[in-house]
Amino acid sequence: MQPENDKPDASPVGEPKDVDPKTLNSDNTSPSDPAQPPGPIRANPVQSEPIRPRMTERRFAQVSRRELLKVAPVLALGAFAIPRFQQSLLKKGLAFSDWASARLFRSGHMAPTFADAEVTPFDKFPINGYDVDDPGVIFESWSLTVSGAVQKPGDYKLAQIQALPRTRQNTRHVCVEGWDVIGRFGGARLSDFLSLVGADTSARYLTMTCADDYYESLDMETALHPQTLLCYEMYNQPLTREHGAPLRLNIPTKVGYKQAKYLTDLKVTNVLEKVGYWEDQGYSSFYSL
């Protein structure tokens, strides 16, 4: 006797069985019907919200700073495009540049020096003047007038400056116009001359005026640099009128316009009424190389 669930199918052969529509696949085949291969299984799509990473407050701040840095140059350029902001921005930028250069300047750091074979021939050394190539200094009556915070103010003749130890150096002269040459310069260290006149080296500045009405200033640290010269000769010969005779500055750590020619007055001071001819027109006041 067979179990009940093993009873043979009572449906006539060839007639379809009654099939519950709920059990049919989408292709009208029953998954339990061995006569038909199983149809593809189609899962109903599940609608769900996309997963979005949560941005923490710290992450937002980092992104905000990064985006701000990206647009900062554009904002700065935009500010420069506004005429009333241009002058102020340029002055502040130049002041910051001078401040940073002064902090980086090292009195013991020497400018490069060169072999005699590398020196530019004297006749190839450009003559660059402020007003005239020769302001007509009368050498016999010339003197350098010293004033300000010094113990021995007065007029100093060229012979007194030449009596100080002489230094000769082959250094590069760099002009703000874009050219540079290597020259041979000779003279007394400005630091030795300041000792001679009893200068207060805690003062901040030196100011110089010239026979052609040019004027300039130096920070005290640059004035005391061992390569800063009161220059009275070039190429082992007396300085020529075109190059600033009888006395000029040679400062290889500074750009050319700081190296005033035809010196007539030197003052040690803590206050600058004027910085320099070019500086007062917007050029850098420190301009270290």
Image (cartoon, helix red, strand yellow):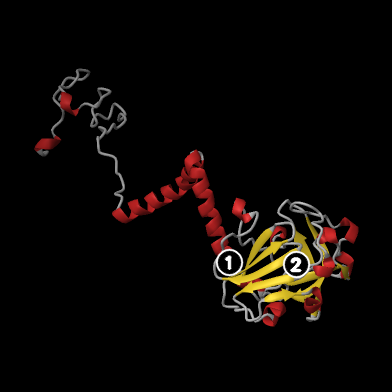
- Residue 64 is situated, as x and y percent measured from the top left of the image, at 37, 49
Is residue 191 left or right of 17 when viewed as pictured?
right
Front in this rendered view, residue 204 or 43 = 204
All told, the count of numbered labels is 2
Q: Amino acid at mark 2?
A: Asn
Q: What residue sits 53% from the left and 52% below the top? A: 91
Is residue 269 left or right of 82 when viewed as pictured?
right
Front in this rendered view, residue 155 or 259 = 155
Q: What residue sits 64% from the left and 73% below the top? A: 147
Q: Is residue 179 above or below residue 150?
A: above
Q: Secondary structure at mark 1?
A: helix
> Which image quadrant is residue 20 in?
top left
Mark number for residue 102?
A: 1
Residue beneath disc 2? 250
Quarter of the picture containing the C terminus is: bottom right
Is residue 211 left or right of 21 when viewed as pictured?
right
Q: What residue sits 23% from the left and 32% below the top? A: 32
Say whether disc 1 or disc 2 marks the residue closer to the N-terminus.
Answer: 1
Residue 276 visible in image: yes
> Which image quadrant is residue 129 in?
bottom right
Q: Are marks 1 and 2 in contact (CB under 8 Å)?
A: no
